[in-house]
Amino acid sequence: MAGRIRIDLDSPVPATRQIADALRVELVEGRLKPGDELPSVRRAAVDLGLHFNTVADAYRLLAAEGWIDLKHGRSARVAERKAPPASRDAVVGYRQRLRALVSQMRADGISSRRIADELEALAKGVLS
Amino acid sequence: MAGRIRIDLDSPVPATRQIADALRVELVEGRLKPGDELPSVRRAAVDLGLHFNTVADAYRLLAAEGWIDLKHGRSARVAERKAPPASRDAVVGYRQRLRALVSQMRADGISSRRIADELEALAKGVLS
DNA sequence: ACAGCTGTATACTGTAGGCATACAGTATAC
DNA sequence: GTATACTGTATGCCTACAGTATACAGCTGT
């Protein structure tokens, strides 16, 4: 499944979203390309230690976002996808979430230096 | 309450956490200083359009993190707080969450340039 | 002491996450 | 063609948790 995904059952963020998030990273970063087949829901489920319906929900979520094509009897495939035009106010929502995350890191005692480094590394990665 | 907070009831992230997250930003960034009084749970609740018990839960969450002092009959106050030493592996968890968030931004059609700018601005803000 | 604020505790209701199980479409071998 | 073994789908159930209502209890001014 293109890199091991760790699911934290204790996390407040549901497993379904954790799976979708992890796969979305692979998709956005191009490690999963259009036409690629995803592992079956049952295969992925045993790998992750979850029920296959949970994986199926994650797949449906990604399908709703246009990332993958689902058809009944055959494997899920990565779809071609043109990015939707950015909604202007979406940015402010994300900015809030980013700031909240950074504040949480600071609250956890991670140094400013370290946080800034992580952010800059991310920014570089995005542009490349 | 130190800046208007918008609560999105449709969001999958619960209102309690949204409140705590927003307040934690204010606390980390120093706009709420030790000794300051927070608005009462009922006051804040009407401002946010929620039940005061929801706000109380958020306060308890922050109290558990050491940010504020709660005592029965009197207003919640911002506490002095020494940051705990960072747990080393906490960073990798946050890195995952950051990457997931960035991927979601890209998936929403926000340009790489814009995302990088947001991240760099954040990094600068953290260091200052 | 009393009135009016404060946060606390308990019970209730609705909803959503995850799982079990039965179903239905597709592809491949024969 | 049809059997078979794979795919994803649909329904129902159980549990946990978010949000609310309502009653309680501790401070602090007058």
Image (cartoon, coloured by chain):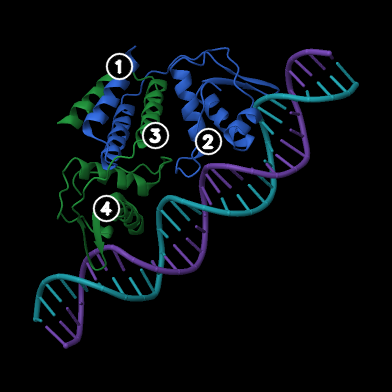
Chain colours: A green, B blue, C cyan, D purple
Q: Which residue is mark 4?
A: A66
Q: Which residue is mark 1?
A: B124
Residue at x-position 47% and y-position 24%: B24
Number of the label disc, if any, that sits on residue B16: 2
Disc 1 on helix, strand or loop? helix
Residue A103 image offset from top left, x and y in percent? 40, 23
Q: Horizontal placement of A38 versus B105: left or right?
A: left
Residue A125 image offset from top left, x and y in percent? 18, 30
> Is B6 above or below relative to B75?
below
Q: Are marks 4 and 3 in one subunit?
A: yes
Q: Are marks 4 and 2 in one subunit?
A: no
The CA distance from mark 4 to mark 3 is 21 Å
Circles 4 and 3: CB atoms closer than 8 Å: no
The CA distance from mark 4 to mark 1 is 35 Å
Q: Which residue is mark 3?
A: A93
Disc 4 on helix, strand or loop? loop
Count residues near mark 4 (Cα–Cα under 10 Å), then give few for <14, some for 14-19, many for 20+.
some
Disc 3 on helix, strand or loop? helix
Query: Disc 1 marks which amino acid?
Result: Lys
Number of the label disc, if any, that sits on residue B75: none
Query: Disc 4 marks which amino acid?
Result: Gly
Sequence order check, earlier mark of 4 and 3: 4
Circles 3 and 2: CB atoms closer than 8 Å: no
**In terms of depth relative to the viewer, which is nearer, B115 or A97?**
B115
Label 1 vs label 3, nearer the camera: 3
Count residues near mark 2 (Cα–Cα under 10 Å), then give few for <14, some for 14-19, many for 20+.
some
Check the picture and name the quadrant holding the C terminus of chain A: top left
